[in-house]
Amino acid sequence: MREGSLEAPTRHDIDWTDPDFINTEKIDEEMRRVFDICHGCRRCFNLCDSFPRLFDLVDASPTSELDGVDSKAFKGVVDACTLCDMCFLTKCPYVPPHEFNIDFPHLMLRYRAADFEKGKTSVVSKELAKTDRNGKIASLTAPIANWATKTDNAITRPLLEKTLKIHKDAAIPRFNSQTLLKQTEKNPLTINKNAPAYGQKAVIYATCFGNYNNPSLGLAARAILAHNGVETAVVYPGCCGMPSLEQGDLEKVSSNAGHVAAELKPWIDKGYTVIALIPSCTLMLKQEWPLINPDNETVKALSIATKDISEYIVFLSKTFGLAPGLDPLGENITLHLACHARAQNIGQKAAEMLRLIPGTKVDVIERCSGHGGTWGMMVDNFETAIKVGKPAAKQAIKNNNRLILSECPLAAEHLMQGIARESSEGLSFTSLHPIEILAKAYGFEI
């Protein structure tokens, strides 16, 4: 037997249409196999709350082994998994091709898929996962929605906590009445024909967050790319399905994948690179969709054609060189590397991109913020999410850079809440997306 982690990890297709995939007995058998290996290793004890919960169950059992743990207790371990993929990619020595064949996140996904199929997923969770519907409604009523979801609203936040189980102190993303698609239609850009990368073409997949919550991400990307000679279009056929994946609704994810891939295929056929604005969405297009739809050639083509926005800027820089105009910020940056950016296995592209700004020192934090999508907002999870993100928050405070950036807006907001709890009075921090800072360095007003 070879020691693990000597070869690049590989992932198996997710055979979610096989009846055995949601067979309760087979899932329990696989969980006991995997959990027993995890118990004997314990290398992941400090990644998230799933592993401490698992190890506490084992240690508290009559036998101090997994055979003394009731299978009903496994749900707590599953519920704590945020599908960040860090155990699979950075810690576990037993991932395939090792013969132990451990894929902890996808095993948690399998358990959730079985629960979803059996109607055990809560109605609230299902409704929160409908990001397109929620985004459309909230954008139409943005001033009211933003007022109602402010953490200092003593009228509505306790009500949201009681009805939707969203913790009253958890930050909720704001909505914008002018979506990215609307603003793109109103503001055509002139392409810089003198830029080294002139002739390149990219289609920006807006993502639900970029379209409904923070259009400035897409506007900043468009401005930067136009200045660098890249012809762009902005499209949004629908959500990537990450919220549905978190619920185990794999049929919905598969449907979204097929629809979005079909909509983007004509752009790919015309030579456009597909750029996603949020790492979680990029990860879905690149990695999760092909595993869920392994026989869909259009999904495979999209996976190959997709790049993260930071990854694409670095590609332009290394391949052609960037257009001039980047000015020093006059301050240093703390960059939180989002888990789903790391899970793409492309390196620290956001840090590479930010270091293109003259005279900029970038302090990188490679620790989870603790948020995990909607997981960290919920009553049962918020305090745990803050605890998981505490090391990252403390590191940001220690760096003492005013600018604290993350490619994941939800992670950034949550990290700022953790910092507020840990920091002493007088410290002031600002949170933005790296692409917004690059636009600022170019002098663009977004």
Image: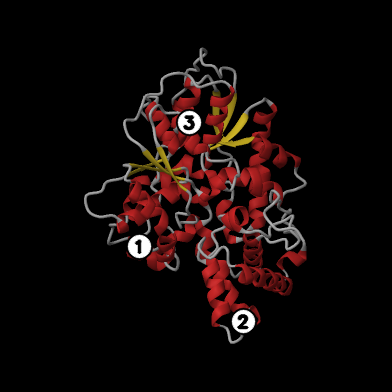
Please name whichever residue, 4 or 174, is drawn nearer the observer in this view of the structure: 4
The one of 209 and 300 positioned closer to us in this rendering:
300
Residue that numbered label 2 is attached to:
70
Q: Which mark is residue 221?
A: 3
Q: Amino acid at mark 2?
A: Asp
Residue 155 occupies which quadrant of the picture? bottom left
Q: Position of residue 217 (x, y in %)?
A: 45, 36
Q: Would you call the spot at circle 3 few (<14 residues within 10 Å), some (14-19), or many (20 or more)?
A: many
**Residue at image mark 1:** 168
On the image, which quarter does residue 91 sit in?
bottom right
Amino acid marked by disc 1 = Lys
Horizontal side of 247 relative to 185 (left or right) equals right
Secondary structure of the residue carrying numbered label 3: helix
Instruction: Tell me how many marks there are.
Output: 3
Q: Are marks 2 and 3 in contact (CB under 8 Å)?
A: no
Can residue 166 be seen here? The reply is: no
The residues tagged by marks 3 and 1 sit, at their Cα atoms, a distance apart of: 33 Å
Give the class, few, some or many, for how many residues have Cα within 10 Å of label 1's Cα (few <14, many ≥20): many
User: Which of the two discs, 3 and 1, labels the residue nearer the N terminus?
Assistant: 1
Q: Which residue sits at x=63%, y=27%?
A: 272
Marked residue nearer the N-terminal end (2 or 3): 2
SS assignment at label 2 = loop
Which quadrant, please, contains the N terminus?
Answer: bottom right
Residue ID at (63%, 47%): 256
